[in-house]
Image: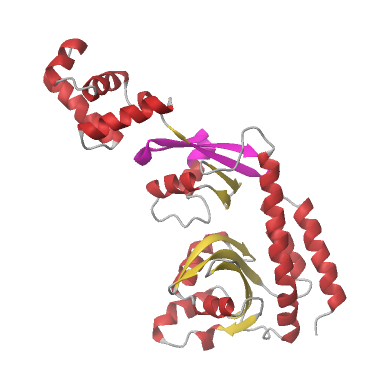
């Protein structure tokens, strides 16, 4: 049986860490503390949503595993959700799985190969479910096949500690958001996001999420796309041409604050293009625009067509609407 006094002391350590540790370091610190009660070699701590046999990740943290294996683990978990479903059906209880027994049929061979390659054959899994159906938080502890199975002590300790791990993580994240919110440049909202320095998402508003997804449709919503993170590190800003927006970044302690802003029409076009589309959107004909701007009518037509492509519009009506929207947001 688990030592109750030791469990309570560890819970107190978790809450102290939540208040004293940065958001970037907290989950590693919490899992290292958990290792004093349960021996494991690797862990995957994540939130997400189960729906119709599929799993959608919100956030994911690896412990004792190389970060370059993130994509493999995400893909495997999305494809083979049975352990997640079992844990979700009995929230709070720790469930033990052994990969060779769990993945016996030919269709699940990739899952078994992944577990063997990463030495994750033995698994102790627990879930904390939220109010929404299928939405919750999972913690998966792992040992290799050469190690002994998880025992009753391990299952009891994880069952008792998981609510505290979850609450401490929520507290740590809330404190990080509150600290950032006290800064004049950060107020959480749909146009804001807060990430760790490696791009791991802490808070992501809907506008930021939609903006990133328009440029990177395969984005997993756990960590910023590597190309976006590189561009932000190099330039402090990244254009999102698909939506006529730009994402800017600013460092705050151990985090990055992202802000989405609409890019003014005048900044998305050259001076000549802007002058031509303003007249064209106002109803002027090619010949009239040519006379006013000192251009040939064919040049005006070419400028309009090029501007259509830049602004991703397909008609004069859409162009006029974009011009009005740009004027209203100025």
Would you say the magenta stretch is mainly helix, strand or loop? strand
Q: Residue 23, can we see it?
A: no
Q: Who is closer to the viewer here, 92 or 144?
A: 92
Residue, x 22% and y 37% (percent of image)?
314
Residue, x 69% and y 59% (percent of image)?
169
Against 71, residue 261 (above or below) is: above
Pinpoint residue 24: horizontal percent, then vertical percent. Answer: 67, 52
Q: Please indicate whether residue 298 sits to the left or right of residue 88 in the image.
A: left
To which quarter of the image does residue 153 belong? bottom right
Q: Quadrant of the N terminus?
A: bottom right
Pinpoint residue 19: horizontal percent, then vertical percent. Answer: 78, 52
Render colour scheme: secondary structure
Query: Which span of residues is magenta-colored?
Result: 231-260
**Which residue reaches farthest right?**
5
Pinpoint residue 170: horizontal percent, then vertical percent. Answer: 68, 58
Against 119, residue 223 (above or below) is: above
Q: Please indicate whether residue 66 sits to the left or right of residue 210 in the image.
A: right
Q: Residue 2, can we see it?
A: yes
Against 24, residue 231 (above or below) is: above
Q: Quadrant of the C terminus?
A: top left
Query: Total number of numbered labels?
Result: 0
Q: Please indicate whether residue 309 sits to the left or right of residue 139 in the image.
A: left
Residue, x 41% and y 50% (percent of image)?
213
Q: Who is closer to the viewer here, 313 or 65?
A: 313
Q: Who is closer to the viewer here, 329 or 143?
A: 329
To which quarter of the image does residue 239 belong? top left
Based on the picture, tell me whether residue 241 belongs to the magenta stretch. Answer: yes
């Amino acid at each position: 049986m688990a030592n109750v006094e030791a469990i309570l002391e560890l819970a107190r350590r978790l809450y102290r860490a939540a208040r004293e540790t940065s958001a970037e370091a907290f989950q590693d610190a919490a899992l290292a503390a958990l290792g004093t009660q349960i021996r494991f070699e690797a862990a995957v701590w994540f939130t997400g949503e189960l729906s119709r046999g599929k799993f959608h990740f919100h956030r994911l943290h690896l412990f004792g595993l190389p970060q370059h294996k993130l994509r493999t683990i995400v893909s495997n978990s999305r494809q083979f959700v049975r352990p997640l479903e079992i844990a979700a059906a009995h929230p709070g209880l720790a469930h033990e799985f052994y990969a060779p027994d769990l993945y016996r049929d030919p269709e699940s061979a990739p899952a078994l190969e992944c577990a063997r390659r990463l030495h994750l054959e033995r698994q102790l899994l627990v879930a904390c479910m939220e109010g929404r159906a299928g939405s919750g938080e999972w913690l998966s502890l792992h040992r290799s096949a050469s190690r002994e199975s998880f025992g009753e002590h391990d299952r009891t300790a994880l069952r008792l500690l998981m609510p505290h791990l979850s609450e401490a993580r929520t507290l740590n994240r809330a404190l990080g958001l509150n600290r950032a919110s006290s800064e004049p440049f950060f107020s959480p909202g749909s146009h804001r996001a807060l990430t760790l320095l490696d791009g791991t998402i802490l808070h992501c508003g809907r506008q930021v999420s939609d903006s990133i997804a328009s440029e990177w449709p395969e984005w997993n919503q756990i960590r910023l796309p590597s190309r976006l993170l590189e561009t932000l590190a190099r330039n402090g800003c990244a254009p999102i041409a698909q939506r006529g927006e730009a994402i800017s970044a600013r460092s705050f302690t151990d985090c990055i604050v992202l802000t989405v802003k609409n890019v003014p029409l005048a900044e998305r076009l050259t001076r000549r293009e802007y002058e031509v589309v303003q007249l064209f959107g106002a109803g002027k004909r090619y010949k009239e625009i040519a006379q006013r701007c000192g251009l040939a009518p064919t040049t005006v037509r070419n400028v309009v067509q090029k501007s259509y492509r830049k602004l991703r519009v397909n008609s004069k009506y859409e162009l006029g609407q974009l011009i009005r929207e740009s004027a209203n947001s100025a």
